[in-house]
Image (tube, grey):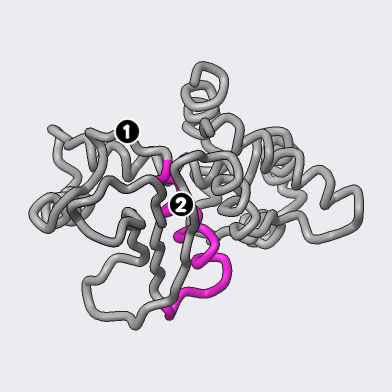
Amino acid sequence: MEFKDLYSFAEDAITEREKSGKKTAVPVRNLADEIIQKTIWLESVNIYPVDHHKNDPFGHYECHGNQESHWEEADAWTALITYNNTLNICEKRFVVCKELMHVFDKEQSQVRNGDQYKILVTEIELRPINQSEQYISENTAQWMALLVLCPKIHRDKMVALAENDTISFFEVALKFRIPESVVQSLISEYYDSAYDLLIQNG
């Protein structure tokens, strides 16, 4: 499965939910199930809350082969996503969706050991000029999450209302069930750039 396919699924799902009078937000579990169904190598996606500890990330993604022994070749994989149990529902949706987007990581972008993970955490905090593939992947995953949770056809309607002061950032966040802190990114020109890069030209 390619990311563009998941985006189309999300766009259609939100359209159908609006027609049937349901809440606009597409459940992240539905996105995960669609990825499982359309991705040959992925057998399951398990999502769990974890206790919060100081300086822990809000979410974490790992992928494990389902072989019985590490000597065997894995023919199926399980994605494990954990999220901070102190997050509210909108934060949880965004964090879990962002972690789910790592299913689309290229091999060179994957975090494979503890040292790479420590480097990534440091980069996220300090935002260096010379960025690793893993850091770029982390940033891309955030934009992918925003795109599938708020597809452009639905996002553009909200932007028009927000620009006319018809609705507030809080109301935009409530409609899509996303954190209010990411609404600024949603209505920015960077959203259009991400759409062009990942959907139009992806």
Q: Look at the numbered discs 1 and 2 and tell me whether their residues touch, using CB distance below 8 Å.
A: no
Q: Earlier in the sequence, mark 1 or mark 2?
A: 2
- On the image, which quarter does residue 54 sit in? bottom left
- Classify residue 52 as left or right of residue 114: right
Q: Which residues lie in the magenta part? A: 85-103
Q: What kind of element bears circle 2?
A: helix
**In front of the other: 102 or 156:** 102
What's the residue type where badge 1 is placed? Lys
Q: Determine which residue is flagged by label 1.
A: 106
Residue 168 can be seen in this image: no
**In front of the other: 163 or 22:** 22
Which residue is at 32% across, 33% downward? 106
Q: Is residue 61 above or below residue 136?
A: below
Which residue is at 31% across, 39% downward? 137
Q: Which mark is residue 100?
A: 2
Residue 57 is situated, as x and y percent measured from the top left of the image, at 29, 65
